[in-house]
Amino acid sequence: MGDTVRIGVLGCGRISDLQVQGYLAHPRARVVAVCDVDARRAAERASAWGADRVYAELDRLLADPEIDAIDVLTPHHLHAEQAIAALEAGKHVSLQKPPTRTVAELDRVLEAAARSGRVLRVFENFMHYPPHRKAKELLDAGAIGTPISIRIKTAGGRLTDGWKVDASSMAWRVSRELCGGGATTFDHGFHCYQMARMMIPAEVERVHAFIHWTKLAPGVDYDGPALISWRYAGDPPRMGSWEVIASLGMRVRSKYYVSDDRMEVHGTEGILWVNRCTGQLLDEPSLVLYRDGETRAFHDLETDWADSFRHGGIDFVDALLEGRQPALDGSEARKTLAFAIAAGRSAAQGREVGLDEVLAGGPES
């Protein structure tokens, strides 16, 4: 790899427009090739991003010697085999969250990364959302003392609002077999589980979940409402919860998906609130800190959801150029994936599930 990281994008669906923003903004990165089964869509993306090569087959993309890294943006059931093939072809890999459907699949990818000596990055954009990054900075600085509790709320609204997503993109997402779990509590849930791990500096130990499956249309079930709670290991006692609700008649102000996520972190000496993420439901500061009887609002943070993708892409390029690990590597993503699987297993089996059970592997993991 020279002075510029040359990116090949695998999968040109809805999220790809945001995913490439960091590459397009970085002075030492370039999107050089795209690959998609839809030739028209691939050509349109290539033209928009300045890529000069378009492929319809993965083998041809991976055989291109002028590509340093592959960004995998395909449906979840394809991730493992495609990532392994890319690593074996000598490419660095960015793998969209969730990285795989099971821990066993991810372990095969991790083994391929170790054999190849290439970087495996799992992309989770909430980590790079500026209010979340600032919240983490404040927590690490002791702004609310020792963090002891986190509460996350996801609110969805009318499906006719927000950006338009192709029916084909939604079809695999609502298939538990292809997605790996529920579209909300597994796919979107990876964001929230990673936030729980990022904001509280302790390993998640046990998970309990209630997930109700709501029928939206013939063959289409929505995994909500839901309530997932968890306990962290060690002392002091620390716990967290995530509530999912869909108000299907509510208009959601959003340029993107018709949902928003809010987060509240309590510490021994104060509270942090993150008041928006994907959508723009609340006309309040994106980040608020309470301590010593005083409230401090942060008004100068970037709050467009696209900013999280831009910062995430920049982090991947910088990691490759600097020879360091990206913000979320495969081994840490494995724990977040186990968290997501534990929630689904808990709801299905009506019991509390330990992450050690999932991380140990087995046919259901």
Image: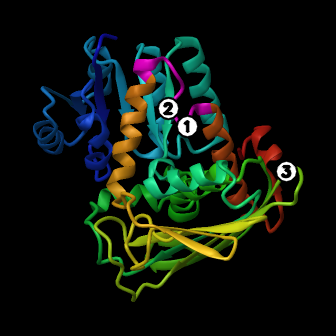
Instruction: Please tell me whether mark 2 sits on a helix, a strand or a loop.
Output: strand
Q: Amino acid at mark 1?
A: Leu
Quadrant of residue 320 within the rendered picture = top left
Viewer-proximal residue among 148 and 232: 148
Is residue 320 found left or right of 310 in the rendered image?
Answer: right
| CA neighbours of label 3 inside 10 A, class few (<14), some (14 to 19), many (20+) | some
Q: Amino acid at mark 2?
A: Arg
x 37%, y 73%: residue: 280
Query: Which residue is situated farthest in the bottom direction here?
Result: 249
Q: Which residues are magenta?
A: 320-330
| CA neighbours of label 1 inside 10 A, class few (<14), some (14 to 19), many (20+) | some
Q: How is the image coloured?
A: rainbow
Q: Disc 1 designates what residue? A: 328
Q: Disc 2 designates what residue? A: 121
Q: Earlier in the sequence, mark 2 or mark 3?
A: 2
Q: Is residue 212 visible?
A: no
Vertical placement of 44 versus 161: above or below? above
| CA neighbours of label 2 inside 10 A, class few (<14), some (14 to 19), many (20+) | many
Label of residue 233 in the image: 3
Asked if labels 1 and 2 touch by Cβ distance under 8 angstroms, the answer is yes
Asked if labels 3 and 1 touch by Cβ distance under 8 angstroms, the answer is no
Viewer-proximal residue among 297 and 124: 297
Query: Which residue is situated farthest in the right direction here?
Result: 235
x 51%, y 53%: residue: 134
From the image, give the main secondary structure of the stretch colored magenta: loop
Indicate whether residue 278 is drawn in magenta.
no
Q: Amino acid at mark 3?
A: Ala
Q: Is residue 333 visible?
A: yes
Is residue 95 found left or right of 198 in the rendered image?
Answer: left
